[in-house]
Amino acid sequence: MKTKLTKATWLFLIATTVFSSLIFIIGGSLIKFIMLVPGISAIIATVFTNRKWSAFGWKFSIKYALLSWLIPILYSALAYVIIWLTGIGDVPNPLFIERAKLTIGLESDSTFQVVTISFFYITIFMLIPAVIFALGEELGWRGLLFPELSKNFSFLKAAILSSFLWAIWHLPAMLLDNYGVEETPFAFRFIMFLLLVVFTGIIMSWIWLKSKSVLAVAIFHASHNVVIQMFFDRITLDKEYTNYFKGEFGIALVITTLIFVYLVLKLDKSFIKNQ
């Protein structure tokens, strides 16, 4: 017997495809609002299928909020420490230090102090606006798509499928909007990004399942974005092959997120199996 997707799933996927396509066709300043499309589509799907609003998961737990903030920092730190220790990239980037001092208004000559204050400034204060945009995506991917797929698929299948579709949704931006432009072949960038999104998506699906909170996964998403894009990427001084390893389009984060996927599946095996 074939597994059927729910009406909410179909409507969400259709609305997301249509609205995202329109934004890329129109272009211009509308592109900055692309992250809101999955959330808007999820709301539309919820309204027209009489899906319960509570199905998104609105619980708030300090435990899972902190865990969602911390996990991206841990797997990112591990990836970049490997890059720095192996000499693939250098640290710190002098340009980052100078810009950080100007942005935060520091007059300290201590590199350690500037880096430390910058880290907490980025991962805490810059996190707040990032969560709003991340929620625009997570209402769709983890708030609707993953739980709807979970009605007919196992945890792992639902997590992988929803994360794969999430990754594919980014493809037009990579092709048309210069998203992820690095000095590496496009095929390499896309494969690394696809794997990273699937691995992080599995972890985020687990967090949603444990917390029943779309807010928690929005914090995770935002923490991932700011700590990588605004801190670790910028503090790293590139060498010849650094771009093959750093960032969301390099191999280092793929390796470290895979480690965390293994830990989640291994340590919480009984919980996941019963879902």
Image (spheres, grey):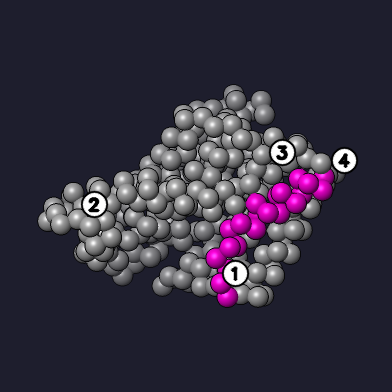
The answer for how far apart the CA atoms under marks 2 and 3 are is 42 Å
Asked if residue 145 lies in the magenta stretch, the reply is no
x 14%, y 54%: residue:
108
Q: Where is residue 266 in the image (x, y as percent from the top left)?
A: 52, 30
In x, y percent, where is residue 243? 38, 65
Residue type (three-letter) at the residue carrying disc 2:
Val
Quadrant containing the N terminus in the rendered view = top right
Give the residue displayed 37% in from the left and 48% down from the top. 125
Magenta stretch in the rendered image = 28-49
Separation of disc 1 and disc 2 at Cα?
Answer: 34 Å
Residue found 47% across the figure and 30% down from its top: 62
User: Do the CB atoms of the residues marked 1 and 3 lie less than 8 Å apart?
Assistant: no
Q: Is residue 255 visible?
A: no
Q: Earlier in the sequence, mark 1 or mark 2?
A: 1
Classed neighbour count for the residue bearing mark 4: other residues with Cα under 10 Å, few (<14), some (14–19), many (≥20): few
How many neighbours does mark 1 have within 10 angstroms: few (below 14), some (14-19), or many (20 or more)?
A: few
Q: Where is residue 136 in the image (x, y as percent from the top left)?
A: 59, 52
Please name the residue shown 61% across and 57% down the image: 36
Instruction: Find disc 1 in the rendering and name its residue.
Output: 30
SS class, disc 2: helix
- The three-letter code of the residue at mark 4 reads Met
Residue identified by numbered label 3: 53
Q: Name the residue under label 4.
A: 1
Image position of 126 with respect to 149: above or below: below
- Given residues 210 and 239, the one toward you in this image is 210
Crowding around mark 3 (Cα neighbors within 10 Å: few <14, some 14 to 19, many 20+) is few
Residue named by callout 2:
115
